[in-house]
């Protein structure tokens, strides 16, 4: 398998404000996404060497057990399609960095080899 070379933002998180403005019902679970579309996303990501973000903020922090189970099941379908994953905290301020641990815990639940974990190319940025 060729490692992913690009990483998009987290799929299937939507701003509730946008739904409210358009009069759409809330998007409360990835169970609403047909499995065929999830598999299509997984195949496209694999073929284009694009990692999918496991997002510790928008999709993991403060969610119900039912929401989390559905999200992990969704990620497992993507994993079956050969997707690589990036771990994201959705950190908009320093206090949000702990969310990266939530994403790491989900990656571990998926029981994937480390070569399915996307890392940016190059050396880490170190201040000082």
Image: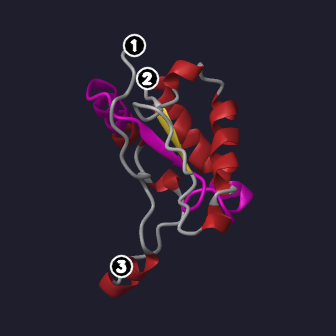
Which quadrant would residue 41 be assigned to in this image? top left
Q: Which residue is mark 1?
A: 1
- State the residue position of label 2: 82
Magenta segment: 39-67
Residue found at x 56% / y 57%? 59
Q: Is residue 21 above or below residue 29?
A: below
Residue 15 in the image: state x and y as whole percent.
42, 73
Where is residue 51 shown, x and y percent of the image?
A: 40, 35
Q: Residue at x 40, y 31 (%)?
A: 121
**Tag 3, which secondary structure?**
helix
The CA distance from mark 1 to mark 2 is 8 Å
The tag on residue 77 is: none
Q: Earlier in the sequence, mark 1 or mark 3?
A: 1
From the image, state whether disc 1 or disc 2 is nearer to you: 1
Q: Is residue 4 left or right of residue 96?
A: left
- The residue drawn where x is 43% and y is 56% is 12
- As drawn, is 106 to the left or to the right of 3? right
Query: Could you classify mark 3 by the number of other residues whose Cα lies within 10 Å: few (under 14), some (14-19), or many (20 or more)?
Result: few
Q: Quadrant of residue 6?
A: top left
Q: Is residue 48 magenta?
A: yes
Element carrying mark 2:
loop
Which residue, given by chain and number where applicable, does mark 3 sit on?
Answer: 18
Q: Nearer the viewer, residue 105 or 69?
A: 105
Give the quarter of the figure containing the N terminus.
Answer: top left
């Amino acid at each position: 398998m060729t490692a992913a070379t690009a990483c998009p933002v987290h799929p299937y998180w939507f701003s509730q404000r946008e739904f409210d403005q358009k009069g759409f019902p809330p998007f409360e679970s990835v169970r609403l996404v047909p499995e065929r579309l999830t598999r299509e996303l997984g195949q496209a990501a694999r073929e284009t060497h694009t990692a999918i973000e496991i997002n510790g903020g928008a999709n993991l922090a403060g969610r119900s057990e039912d929401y989390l189970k559905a999200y992990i099941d969704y990620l497992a379908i993507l994993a079956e399609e050969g997707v690589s994953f990036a771990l994201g905290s959705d950190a908009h301020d320093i206090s949000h960095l702990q969310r990266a641990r939530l994403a790491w815990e989900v990656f571990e639940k998926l029981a994937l080899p480390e070569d399915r974990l996307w890392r940016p190319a190059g050396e880490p940025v170190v201040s000082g």
